[in-house]
Structure formats: C-alpha cells, structure tokens
Amino acid sequence: MRNFLKRNKNTPIGRSVRKTRYSLHIFSAKVEDTYEDASEMLEKALARTIRVTERIKLLNLIKLLTVLTIIYVLIFTVISRGTNTGLVLVNDAMELEVIATGFIVLGLNLLYILWQAYLTLRYKPHDLVPDDQLPTCAVIVPAFNEGKQVYPTLMSIVNNDYPADKLKIITVNDGSDDDTIAWMQKAAADSKGRITVIDLPENKGKRNALYQGIMSVETEVFVTVDSDSELLKDTLKQLVSPLAADKKIGGVAGNIRVLNLNEGLIPQILDVSFVYGFEFTRSAQSRIGSVLCTPGALSAYRRNMLVPHLDGWLNEKFLGKPAKIGEDRGIANLLLEQGATVVFQRNAVAFSKMPTSFGGLCKMLIRWARSNFRENFSMMRFAFKRCSWNWLGLQINMIMLYIWMFTPMLFLISSTVSIVKDAMAFFYSAVTVITLWSTIPAFFYACRYGKNESLWAYVYGFLNFFALFWIPPYALLTIHESGWMTRNSKKKQKEAKPEEQV
C-alpha cells in the first residue's frame, strides 16, 4: 500500500487518498477530544452524585421507599374499587404487569435452583487428614447469660478426638449476670485444666468476646462455637481438615442441626429448613468456593488471613452505630474480599438450641435478616471487581440475594391487588405455590434423612407465607438496630451450685 501511494503521489487518486487520510485524522482527533471532555464531565457528575448520596442516610431512603410502596398499594386498592370502564382497564393493565413481574421472578428462581441443584450434586466434603497433618487449633466459645447449657457445650469440645496437644479451648464470659461463669469454671475443673476461662467484667457483645478469645492465643487455626451448640466426637477433625488440605481455603462453615427437637413444633420445622439451608444451599456455594455465611455456631478460619483485618471487623459500624450483629457474615466477607476460598464441610456437625416460641423465632429471623441486608450491601464493595468462573457464581448469588431482598415489596403489592380483585383465587393460588415450592426442601430432606420429618417443610412454607412474610420488610425498616434480641439480661438468682446440679 505504501509503494502504491509513492507511485501515485501526484495523481488524482493519490491526492484523494491523502485528503481522506487527513480528514480521518482530523475526525479522530475531534472524537478523542470529545471523548475526553465527555469523560471529564461524567467523572465530575459521578463525583457530585457520590457526594450527594453519601449525605443521604440509608435509613431515610428505606423509609421513603416503604412509604411510597404503601401509597402505591393504597392507590391500587382505590383503583380496583372503581366501577367505570376506564378504571377497570387501568386495573387490568396493572394486574397484567404485576403477574408478568411475578412470572419473571419465579422463572429466575427456578433457573437459580436448578443451577444450585447441579452444583450440590457435584459437591463432596473434604476427606479427613491424618493427625500429624492437622494444624494447631483454638476453639473460642463466647457466652452471655447461657447458664447451664454452656457446660455440655464445653465438655463436647473436650471430648472431641482432635489431638489434645494441638488443641486449646477458650471460653469467654461476656459480662453475664447469671450463673454462666460458674458453669464455665466447673467445665474447666472437670477438663483437668484444658479449658481457659476469660471473664469480661462488662457485656460488650459477641463480636468483642470473640476478638478477646482469638487474640489471647497463637494457633494456626481458630474455631468458633456458640455456647448453646454441642459437637460430635469427630466434628473438629472434620471441620479443620479442609484448611489442612488446601492452603487457599480461608474459612470452613460447619453443618448445623437442631439440638432441641423434642421441645415443640418450631425446632422440628427449623431442622428441615436448616438441612436445606446448609446441605443444599451451602453445598452449592461451596462448589464455587464462596460460602456467603460461616455460622457462628461452628466455623473454622485460617488465622493469618483474618488477624490483620480483625481490628476493622471489631470496630465496624453501620449507619454510625457499632455493628453488634452479623459477625459471622462479616468474617466471611473479609475472607471473600481477599480472594480466599470459603467452603462448607457437611461432615462437621454441631447441634444448636433453637427458639421454641413464635416470638423467639421472629426475633431470631429479624436479627438474621438485618445482618443479611447489611452484609449484602457491604459485599457490593468487592463482589463485581473480579472475573473468573467462581466469581461469576458469587455474582449470580449476589444478584439473587438482591432479588430476594426486595421480593417482599413486590409480594405486598401483588397480594393486595390479588386479594382485592379476587380473594378466593388468591388463596387457592397461594396454597398451590406454597405446596409446590415447599416440595423442594421436603424432597431434599426425605432423600437425606427421613420421609416423615420432611413433611415439616410444608408447615414451614405456610408459616413463612402467612405469618412471617412481614419480617424482611420490617428488618429493612429497622436495619439500623443492632440488638441481639434473644439474649436478655437476667438478674442473679439464688440457684443451686453447678456441682449440685450436674
């Protein structure tokens, strides 16, 4: 091409080519200048937007959205009662939009569950490693007003088959005003000195208690166990083995089952929910190395990946207030943000006490929902900054979490419209959807454990739809609250000494 231009330099063709090249050069220069100007304007606009949005309290935004939603529902109600043709047509159009949106959300959920089922089928727990390959390990058990239950928890750890020379057990009394410290001291005495008791004079929350326990020892791995959980004999070995086998793994989530199954309806339905939430959902998340929540009831962490970041975790604030809930999801987020792998170990089992009353269940679910909302917002800092197949899976999980976060608002609107339009049709549709949707956890539980107990999945489905539907919106409205809710302070009572009760 260059030789051709030289030979035809002074010909009409050559002059035309030179003019064209010059015009293209001028045009590209103008495009570049325009692009730079536009980029500069966009950056300034984004900077202004960020400055403005930083001044907006998230709580106020949430309240505004809720008020608008309620107004929207009231408008729907008024419109649906209209009798003239115009109003009926508008109502039909709105109803069509609501139904279409519902089908889109339903379709996304079905595709998501199929994807999770595929990952779950491919999941396998890590094999046990020999004792000589196990790292040194510290088990941290924080407790506040746990009373007698802390004793069997600590003794189940003492009786584990983890090598005693590699295991330290730390229990932290977080300023309890009942007899918790006495039961801790009894467990320490019965363990022949294997348990170290840290007695904090003031209740500062579970996060601080964990921090004090972690920083009191120097081990390669630390395990968190709730004060109302009991372990199987091989639980610690099973839990720590993935960390010993793969240096990329920073955290391991244990498998939580319900301890007090014989204490009523609620613990039994929660057991089915837990099996689905852990052995289905977390198995799928583990297959892509990004378990979103490592439960405080039983989890293991690689020390050198977390300790450098623990001060920030301890002093974390949300809307200007200290974050006293969601410490387990906060740790999982710290690990995922570093690019560490977080897995689920199905064979590492702990049994935890669950609420037995409806009020206790609501308080627990509200606390979990608040921490989930907070940590989901927090994950936006890093969830979409990496590109890999595993991170694509994490991003899909994040998208679905956000859909589920705001689905209750859609449910509120669609339910109001449907009830006003045809209450019986809504009822029959709701029963059908609940039955079909509850079949998924029921089928999974039946395959894993037993057919009779799996029927509790249907009870939980109806309870969740008709009695617990308000919890996500309420948790979103009160997201600034950090109360534990289920750990009330108790006045000291005259009780029999622990040695007299055991």
Image (spheres, rainbow, N blue to C red):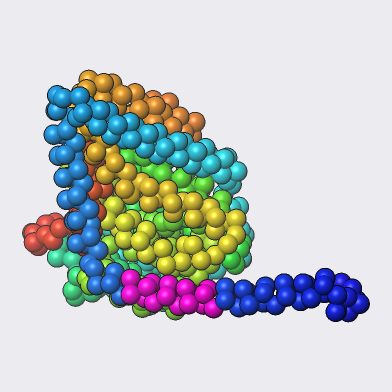
In magenta stretch: residue 46 = yes
The image quadrant that residue 370 belongs to is bottom left
Magenta stretch, main secondary structure, is helix
Count the marks: 0
Of all residues, the one furthest to the front in this rendering is 12
In terms of depth relative to the viewer, which is nearer, 8 or 475?
8
One can see residue 322 in this view: no
Q: Is residue 321 left or right of residue 452?
A: left
Residue 140: x and y in percent read 37, 66
Image height of 207 relative to 501, above or below: below
Residue 453: x and y in percent read 37, 29
Q: Residue at x 43, y 51 (%)?
A: 399
In terms of depth relative to the viewer, which is nearer, 359 or 18?
18
The image quadrant that residue 74 belongs to is top left
* Segment tinted magenta in the rendering: 32-49
Q: Is residue 5 left or right of residue 480?
A: right
In magenta stretch: residue 480 = no
Q: Is residue 112 left or right of residue 66?
A: right
One can see residue 470 in this view: yes
In terms of depth relative to the viewer, which is nearer, 176 or 266?
266
Q: Residue at x 62, y 73 (%)?
A: 27
In terms of depth relative to the viewer, which is nearer, 197 or 383?
383
Quadrant of image for the N terminus: bottom right
Q: Residue at x 30, y 75 (%)?
A: 51
The image quadrant that residue 227 belongs to is bottom left
Image height of 414 relative to 471, above or below: above
Residue 493: x and y in percent read 8, 59
Q: Residue at x 60, y 43 (%)?
A: 122
Image height of 85 relative to 210, above or below: above
Residue 249: x and y in percent read 55, 63
